[in-house]
Image (cartoon, helix red, strand yellow):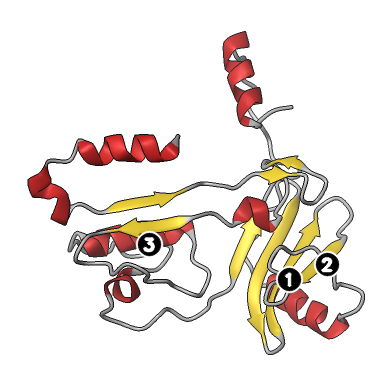
C-alpha cells in the first residue's frame, strides 16, 4: 500500500528533476501491538512506539546502503533538509544536520542524550560505558524502567533493580533534561462532531 503511493509520488516528479529531488520517508511515531501488553501509541515510550523509520533517497548524492549508527531524531530533519538545499540554518534551531554523514562528506555525529516524553512518562536514551541505556519513569508513581538497548534492542527486560549503578547514572542525567510535567496544566475544552470523534478514535488519539 505504501509502495504504491510512494511510486505515485515519484511518478509526479518530471524525469528531468529526479536527480535534484530528495525523498525522505519517516513517521511521527510507531505503533504498539501488545509487545509490552499495550495497544496503541498515545501514552507509552516503548521502542516499538518511539523508534521509527528514517529513509533518505537522493540519487547520485546519498549512496545506497549509507547508514547512521547513532540514534537520530525528528528535530534533525529540518536542519538536514536546509543543508541539502544550501540554505542557512536559523539560530537557535533544535536538532543537528545529518547532511555530512549522509553525503559522505563528514563523520557520523556523536551520540547525544535523547529525551522522550508522553502524557504519562518521561524517558531518556544515552550511552554509558556498559551500553546504550534507556530509562523511562512513570509520572504517577515514579516507577523506573531501565533497559540496555545494546543487548536488548526491544527493551523487554527491566534492569532497574539489578543494575543500581546504571540506574543512578541515568537518573542523574535525566535530572538535567528539560521535561515539562503535564499534570496540572490547564486545558481548553473543545466540542467535536461525531465524525471527528470517530476519526480520532480510529487513529488512537482518544479511547
Of labels 1 and 2, earlier in sequence is: 1
Q: Which residue is mark 1?
A: 152
Q: Which residue is mark 3?
A: 93
Which residue sits at x=25%, y=80%?
105
Of labels 1 and 3, earlier in sequence is: 3
Quadrant into which the N terminus falls: top left
C-beta proximity under 8 Å, tags 1 and 2 = yes
Residue 169: x and y, percent?
75, 82
Residue farthest to the left, as pictured: 16
Residue 97: x and y, percent?
35, 68
Q: In this rendering, is residue 43 above or below 104?
A: above
Considering the numbered disc 1 on the image, is that residue within a helix, a strand or a loop? loop
Which residue sits at x=58%, y=73%?
113
Quadrant into which the C terminus falls: top right
Q: In this rendering, is residue 56 above or below 164?
A: above
Give the class, few, some or many, for how many residues have Cα within 10 Å of label 2's Cα (few <14, many ≥20). Answer: few
Q: Which residue is mark 2?
A: 157
Residue farthest to the top, as pictured: 194
Measure the C-alpha gap from mark 1 to mark 2. 7 Å
Residue 2: x and y, percent?
43, 38
Measure the C-alpha gap from mark 1 to mark 3. 33 Å
C-beta proximity under 8 Å, tags 3 and 2 = no
User: Which of pointers 1 and 3 indicates the residue nearer the eye?
Assistant: 1
Residue 188: x and y, percent?
63, 27
Amino acid at each position: 500500500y505504501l509502495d504504491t503511493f510512494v511510486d505515485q509520488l515519484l511518478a509526479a516528479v518530471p524525469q528531468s528533476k529526479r536527480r535534484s529531488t530528495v525523498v525522505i520517508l519517516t513517521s511521527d511515531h510507531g505503533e504498539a501491538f501488545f509487545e509490552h501488553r499495550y495497544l496503541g501509541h498515545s501514552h507509552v515510550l516503548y521502542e516499538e512506539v518511539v523508534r521509527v523509520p528514517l529513509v533518505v533517497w537522493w540519487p547520485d548524492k546519498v549512496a545506497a546502503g549509507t547508514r547512521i549508527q547513532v540514534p537520530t531524531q525528528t528535530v534533525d530533519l529540518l536542519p538536514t533538509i536546509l543543508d541539502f538545499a544550501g540554505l542557512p540554518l536559523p539560530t537557535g534551531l533544535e536538532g543537528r544536520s545529518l547532511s555530512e554523514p549522509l553525503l559522505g562528506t563528514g563523520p557520523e555525529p556523536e551520540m547525544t542524550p535523547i529525551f522522550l516524553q508522553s502524557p504519562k512518562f518521561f524517558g531518556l536514551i544515552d550511552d554509558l560505558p556498559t551500553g546504550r541505556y534507556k530509562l523511562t519513569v512513570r509520572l504517577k508513581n515514579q516507577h523506573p524502567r531501565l533497559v540496555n538497548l545494546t543487548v536488548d534492542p526491544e527493551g523487554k527486560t527491566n534492569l532497574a533493580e539489578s543494575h543500581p549503578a546504571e540506574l543512578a547514572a541515568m537518573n542523574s542525567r535525566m535530572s538535567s533534561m528539560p521535561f515539562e510535567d503535564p499534570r496540572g496544566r490547564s486545558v481548553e475544552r473543545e466540542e467535536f462532531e461525531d465524525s471527528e470523534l470517530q476519526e480520532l478514535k480510529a487513529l488512537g488519539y482518544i479511547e
